[in-house]
Amino acid sequence: MMLRRLLGTLLATVAVMGPLGACAATPAKPVATAQASALTEAARVADWQLSHMDNFDYIPTSQFRHDTEAPRDWVQAAFYIGLTAFADASKQPKYAEAIIAHGQAESWGFDHRPRHGDADATGAVWVWAAARTHDPAKLVPVRARFDAVLADPSTVDLGFEAKPPEGGQPYCQARWCWSDALFMAPPVWVALSKETQDPRYLAHADSEFWAATDLLYDKDEHLYFRDSRFIAQRSPAGQKIFWGRGNGWAYAGVVRILQDLPKDHPSRPRYEALFRQMSARIVTLQGEQGYWPVSLLEPQKTPETSGTGFFVYGLAWGVNHGLLPAVQYRPTVDRGWKALTAAIEPNGKLGWVQRVGAAPDTVGPDDTQLYGVGAFLLAASEVSRLPPAGKR
């Protein structure tokens, strides 16, 4: 804890940006200026979060503060995944040092749930650290964890049902039966396969990803249901319920798989087709302010930054890697990025992040969470790589 407190103190910064209301009233920055400042804005947000990793009093106890405080669980993992991308993009050693210090403090380990996809997420940070430091010893816990799954893979039905009578997690969560898991788990397996050159991890991720997608992906709307409970549900307005962040998790998960998937892998065309199909749908759902709503088919709902961050990340990545034409997608990225930066408070805190949940919910300007910061850092890292606006 002392190590993290020291890191947080060293990394804290004084921000200079006005509040959300003031930002919204300020004339829009030229696109080129906003693009050039992406890493600067990300540093402000990252530094605020790193300076608050020892005290989460700003999160009400009723909003999963206990989960937030768990250093090996998915909430912190999502932040550190974003921080790895930002460390690579910014090339500032202090961010990589913070990640390595976190891994050392946790002995590169995992939480108590050996098969839960959320608990896999921190493995992505450990794989990144092992690759960066050329130290395969950091991979011992993640390999042991995944090898145990491969030795006895679950075949439980992917339908999301009530928890067992004795309590615990729903049965199906021994597999990836909810859209969040597509960000948390398969990218780790694919990255580990790339780092170790062991094809078993990739084969498992590929099989399980498509099993979940076959169930949860709506082939008409080109969006994911959060889990099987939502397939038949409808909103009070009669709409299908597609959670903004739930789709952000899945969409960003596809991007992270593609980043490490071999170019000649037989499933790559299928992932790329899914990515393009989702991208084409996502751009039609952006709100006038540049945010995506908490419920994607109900644009009157409040704006939200974690889903928006994941969508901006994926769209910018697609433009940068030639999968999406810039002339068609860059304006959406620019509007989304402007919205994200408008949600930064003067001290660097990111607001408008929906609390931990499984469905669209209320969100306010003061609401923040680690995974929202992670999504912001992923977005900033890709926005910083976009070509100047005149070179679209």
Image: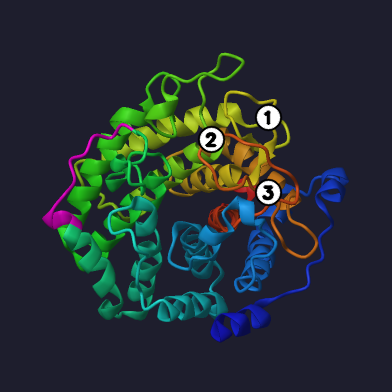
Q: Is residue 251 left or right of residue 92?
A: left
Would you call the spot at circle 2 few (<14 residues within 10 Å), some (14-19), or many (20 or more)?
some
Most common secondary structure along the magenta stretch: loop
- Is residue 367 found inside the magenta-colored segment of the image? no
Identified by mark 3, the residue type is: Leu
Residue at point 47% right, 81% down? 101
Rendered view: 26 above or below 347: above
Mark 3 secondary-structure assignment: helix
Q: Which residue is mark 3?
A: 340
Q: Which residue is mark 2?
A: 359
Would you call the spot at circle 3 few (<14 residues within 10 Å), some (14-19), or many (20 or more)?
many
Q: Quadrant of the C terminus?
A: top right
**Chain part drawn in magenta:** 149-159
- Is residue 156 found inside the magenta-colored segment of the image? yes
Instruction: Return the disc, 2 or 3, that comes first in the chain's sequence.
Output: 3
Rendered view: 308 above or below 43: above
Q: Quadrant of the N terminus?
A: bottom right
